[in-house]
Image (cartoon, rainbow, N blue to C red):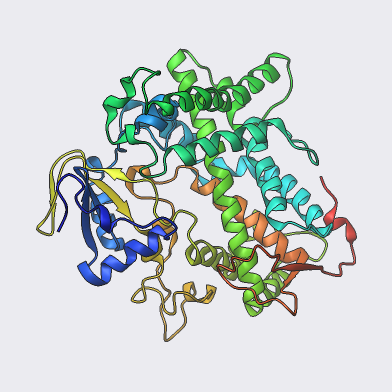
Amino acid sequence: MGLPLLGNIFDMPKPGTIEALHWSKRKQRYGPISSVTVMGKTMIIVNDAKVAFDLLDKRSINYSSRPRQVFAGEMLGWVASLGVQPYDDRFRSTRKVIKREIGSKSAASRYDKAHEIEVAHFLLRLAGDPKDLTQCIKKSTGSLAPRTLYGYVAEPVKEDPLIDLVERAMDTFTQATAPGAFLVDTIPLLKYLPQWMPGSGFKKLARKWRPVVQEMNSKPYAFVRSQLAKGFTNHSYAARLIQAGEPSMEISSINEWSASALFGGAGDTIIGSLLCFFLAMGTYPEVQRRAQAEIDRVVEQDRLPTMSDKPNLPYMEAVILETLRWHPISPIPLAHECEKDDVYGGYPIPKGALIMANVWQMTHEPDVYSDPMAFRPERYMPVEDRPAETDPSKVMFGFGRRACPGRVLGENALFFYIAQTLATFNIKVPENVVAAVGNGEGQETLRFTREQFADQNLLTAQ
């Protein structure tokens, strides 16, 4: 039973609690769909894939908007970015642009060369026996997005100003969108407080952060315009948009923000997936050996796997799927908002309710995935007495009209990183270290041994 005004505030996750695991417990008690109401705002917790598809996909016309984000959206300017935009004409136009440029396999293949170049640099860094795997991955993925989206070649060794700018901007996004972080999101009228009044410190913070957000959006796009004006060749995503023509300021703005949305969203997704992959390979060496054996059968010894090999590497594709399922990068994605009163299975869903899809629970449901905490790529490969288990990518990339438009490009990037890493390295756990999920000790738990190739040019940067 909720308290007056505060509602079910004591049912919310406590500080330090993993949100997805907190909400997963509600399925055992309340079933696949439940709700909490805090300060007048209803949150619908969806712990089942079928319910999520019924609401967010089949009824997507009513569940495709986002809740109002006063601080992050309006005061910092993130409302112009795809992930925060309400479901309106600008949102639809932005998705249309992204889908046209990278939404299909043929369109995304334009950027395969950029993937190959950056992954080659990544392999060279690994060959140098990096002390910090996370930083090595961040450096590589941070370089991949600007090359693909803007034709920008990042500093290979030193800190790069553009990558630093994006990291600072995305840090503001993370802090600004944290649930309950800013009271103005709950009481929008606080936005109009005079700056001198007590409690208006968030306005000072907004003045500090907003220029970072705006610069992250405009600066790299201006770089591409300058490159094209000077006659330089640029085959990037942004260059294609500019060369297609921008007859209005609105179209120019949509193009700019579509590129920066992809820029900001790509990094964390690939970084998290790769860290999960390395942990899995160190923890499950038999999976690593089987994937490497498949590569050896399919790929000639004088080259690394490419996209043309992908159809012939089913186990490798299963490894990527299992990497995405095992530890989802977005266990609970940004909430959808219900735009009109609705009823689902006799359960009332009021207008303005936030729909929170617990992807973690969906990808670890024992009735769907046998032994869900184990890393078992073979679960997606049917055999005579066992059908394939459900493809987790159906829930990993969002739902309905909010599904990730950059999915194909992201999956291609993961294939290059994972397949070429396994073709080049063995990933091992030191004898005195136990690799475990949630180690929490901040220790390096994995090491790399270089494969013995006849042709050492496999690790030459392009």
Q: In this view, does 158 lie above or below 384?
A: above
Q: Image quadrant for the N terminus?
A: bottom left
> Residue 38 appears at what percent x and percent y?
23, 47
Tell me residue 99's x, y (percent). Answer: 46, 38
Above/below status of 255 relative to 35: above
Specify whether 231 is left or right of 363.
right
Residue 312: quadrant of the picture = bottom right
Residue at image point 16% right, 39% down: 340
Q: Which sits in the foreground, 285 or 22?
A: 22
Direction from residue 301 to residue 189 in the image, left or right = left
Q: Where is residue 192 in the image (x, y as percent from the top left)?
A: 31, 20
Residue depicted at 75% across the width and 59% down the height: 304
Q: Is residue 139 above or below residue 221?
A: below
Q: Which of 172 and 460 is in front in this view?
A: 172
**Which of the 4 quarters of the picture holds residue 49?**
bottom left
Along the line of sight, which residue is nearer the eye, 445 or 217? 445
Tell me the residue at 30%/26% (across/down). 190
**Relative image position of residue 110 (x, y in whole percent):** 62, 40
